[in-house]
Image (spheres, coloured by chain):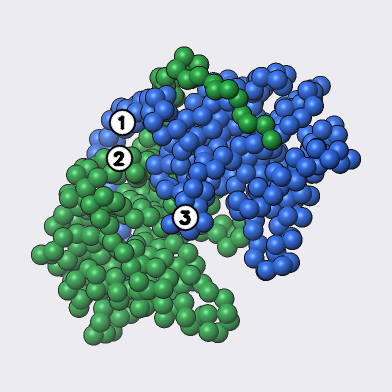
Chain colours: A green, B blue
Amino acid sequence: MTYCIGVSLDAGLVLTSDSRTNAGIDNVSTYSKMHRCMTTPDRMLVIMSAGNLATTQSVIQQIRRDVQEGAPRNVNTLNYLADVAEYLGDVLVAKIRKHTEQTGFVPDATLILGGQILGRNPNIYMIYPQGNYITTSDDTPYLQIGESKYGKPVLDRFLTRETSLEDAAICSLISMDSTMKSNASVGPPIEMMIYSRDQVNNPKHYRFDAENPYLISIRHEWANQLNHAFRAMPRLEEHAHPNGGLHIF
Amino acid sequence: MTYCIGVSLDAGLVLTSDSRTNAGIDNVSTYSKMHRCMTTPDRMLVIMSAGNLATTQSVIQQIRRDVQEGAPRNVNTLNYLADVAEYLGDVLVAKIRKHTEQTGFVPDATLILGGQILGRNPNIYMIYPQGNYITTSDDTPYLQIGESKYGKPVLDRFLTRETSLEDAAICSLISMDSTMKSNASVGPPIEMMIYSRDQVNNPKHYRFDAENPYLISIRHEWANQLNHAFRAMPRLEEHAHPNGGLHIF
């Protein structure tokens, strides 16, 4: 599996992805799932992918070709991020359909597009295998693809539009670490892109492998803090009382 | 959906369940998913259920009838907890198969059996819709059914065989609360049974509705502590460094 998080904040974007792919439990590899598009200088576009690796590679290749060959519709000719999402959806559906028609196998994949076209707000979109897409809202400033459930509570707890880029980055790393702890199909290296609004030429890219000192310090400190938090919980026996007993059937 | 946790400790058992059922998002009800069997005084047996409500109700009814009618094989005639799990599996499969054969619809359900037969250790089993079952291990002292992913990280972090009953209860409440925060299909009241080894006549039963002061205090204090923990994380900008940038395709 995979786990990717896209966070859309007033201050910009934070995109995070793991790097583990597997075709069966005995065929585990490391592939980057974060792809920055070659674009004109007025925009910054990053695509994260979950699902069938052949599909996502062929989508990325098609997007590149459309730029190189000057196709009328490519990531540089579209003027709205939503139109780029629509275009990605069309490419994605075409790649999935080709293989479905040939073999009956449906090589599904899901994408997150994050970026900005200057003059408009930065934003993120999740593109479904069916080609349609959603964006964030003020109440839910993030999108996830892949193994999203383990790491969702910490995002729900801390992320708002007003969260700083750095806090959202730390929150995403904690979410990723919790997921890796509970699910063996999500693994390092972790890639992260921190993008400050309007700085299209300067997205900061981080790569945390399993031995990265900062990733380890986040993991240890979070575990320490949670142990401390757990010890501070109000005690059950002092504050709660058993009732008459469970109905016996 | 549903969320139930069974924890098997050296000191005894902690069983926790939510009470929300839904048949579609517009048909939400409250049903207890924790059922204590009527047994002989040498044993204490509790069943938690997830999945199709008609199936779980008909399973519970069949178990009760087998006791009342003195069937040769019932929850009181079996001498090992594993045999009780096997029996529950057979009842479960029979109920599911009946409806599958009649309509093609497969009304799946999954059970957790927790309890003790005096003279043996307390234990828990998870019984699959296929009738087979698993128990815990020293490394993984808990089992979950239903919406299990959101609340798994906190269990992985804190539970060992040596954990006290009270700590396991608090951990289970936090796991349940995180799940309710992230998934609307899991909801209060929360039921909890705390069972001390060999005290077959005295399992303590708690019921926490949405307004229960202790549940609210756990929720608030955990949120406070996590906020504190989050503030204490080592800062990204001080300790991590962006690399040369993301490969552009």
Nearer to us of marks 1 and 3 is: 3
User: Which of B221 and A150 lies nearest the eye of the viewer?
Assistant: B221
Disc 3 vs disc 2: Cβ atoms closer than 8 Å? no
Residue ID at (21%, 48%)? A161
Residue ID at (23%, 85%)? A72
Residue ID at (47%, 80%)? A97
Give the amino acid type for the residue marked by disc 3 in the picture: Asn
Instruction: From the image, tell me which residue sits under label 1.
Output: B227
Q: Position of residue A71 (x, y in %)?
A: 26, 85
Nearer to us of marks 3 and 2 is: 3
User: Which of A88 and B143 lies nearest the eye of the viewer?
Assistant: B143
Question: Could you classify mark 2 by the number of other residues whose Cα lies within 10 Å: few (under 14), some (14-19), or many (20 or more)?
Answer: some
Question: Label 2 is found on which chain of the structure?
Answer: A
Q: State the image quarter where residue B69 is shown.
A: top right
Q: Is residue B161 visible?
A: no
Instruction: From the image, tell me which residue sits under label 2.
Output: A158
Residue A249 in the figure: left or right of residue A184: right
Q: State the image quarter where residue B211 is shown.
A: top left
Give the amino acid type for the residue marked by disc 2 in the picture: Phe
Q: Is residue A69 visible?
A: yes
Disc 1 vs disc 2: Cβ atoms closer than 8 Å? yes
Q: Position of residue A232 (x, y in %)?
A: 40, 19
Give the amino acid type for the residue marked by disc 1 in the picture: Asn
Name the secondary structure under disc 3. loop
Same chain shared by disc 1 and disc 2: no
Q: CA distance from mark 1 to mark 3?
A: 35 Å
Q: Position of residue B64 (x, y in %)?
A: 75, 40
Residue B113 in the figure: left or right of residue A65: right
Residue B25 in the figure: left or right of residue B83: left
**Residue sitting at the far top:** A238
Instruction: From the image, tell me which residue sits under label 3.
Output: B27
